[in-house]
Image (spheres, rainbow, N blue to C red):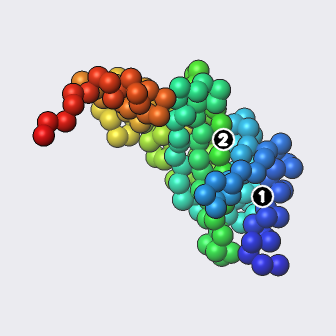
């Protein structure tokens, strides 16, 4: 079996076992699973599929969408098989949380803390849910798209014309 066939088999196993789906964007294939099944999926990915390394945990904010507002993204590596598996969990913007996978991948500890610190996504069952980058008394989560930048509102595709109208014309 080739590497791509092996990966397709793994992806289909996850989709079937955890009621997921496959998503492709810019040539990258991700398995999208319900947030409540992430811990169980991580156990299978580690023990049965042989992905021994958690390379990354991060998030994407789709604000102003609320359902889902965020995707938590996991990147797993199998060093022996030389494979990379991408997994996403869509979660609501209202009290965003999902299970911690720290019990399966120990290095999830600080990666989940960073996602909490920057996006405000809580990881249930995490052993040390403190901020890791920002001071302990910091208000808000700086990587959220609605986080105030200071004097100027962030410009996105949905408010481009409104922001452009308020900016001064360039001086020649």
What kind of element bears circle 2?
strand
In this orientation, does residue 106 appear? Answer: yes
Quadrant location of residue 142? top left
Q: Secondary structure at mark 1?
A: helix
In terms of image quadrants, where is residue 9? bottom right
Rendered location of residue 108, percent (x, y): 54, 49
The extreme bottom residue here reads 1
Residue furthest to the right in view is 16
Give me the disc on residue 11. 1
Classify 10 Å Cα crowding around label 2: few (below 14), some (14-19), many (20 and above).
many
Answer left or right for 116 relative to 19.
left
Residue 151 rendering spot, x and y as whole percentages? 24, 24
Cα–Cα gap, marks 2 and 1: 14 Å
Q: What residue lies at 80% left-to-right and 71% top-to-bottom?
A: 5
What residue appears at the point 60 percent right and 58 percent down from the top-left corner? 26
Q: Indicate left or right for 170 with 131 as reference.
A: left
């Amino acid at each position: 079996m080739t590497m791509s066939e092996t990966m397709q088999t793994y992806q289909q196993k996850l989709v079937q076992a955890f009621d997921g789906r496959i998503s492709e964007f810019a040539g990258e294939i991700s398995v999208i699973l319900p947030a409540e099944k992430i811990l169980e999926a991580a156990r299978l990915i580690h023990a049965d599929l042989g992905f021994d390394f958690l390379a990354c945990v991060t998030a994407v904010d789709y604000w102003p969408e609320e359902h889902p507002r965020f995707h938590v993204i996991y990147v797993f590596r199998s060093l022996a098989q030389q494979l990379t598996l991408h997994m996403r969990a869509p979660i609501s913007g209202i009290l965003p949380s999902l299970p911690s996978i720290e019990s399966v991948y120990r290095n999830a500890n600080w990666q989940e803390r960073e996602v909490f610190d920057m996006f405000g996504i809580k990881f249930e069952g995490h052993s040390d849910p403190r901020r890791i980058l920002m001071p302990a008394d910091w208000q808000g989560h700086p990587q959220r798209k609605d986080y105030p930048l200071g004097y100027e509102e962030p410009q996105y595709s949905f408010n481009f014309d409104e922001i452009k109208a308020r900016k001064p014309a360039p001086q020649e």
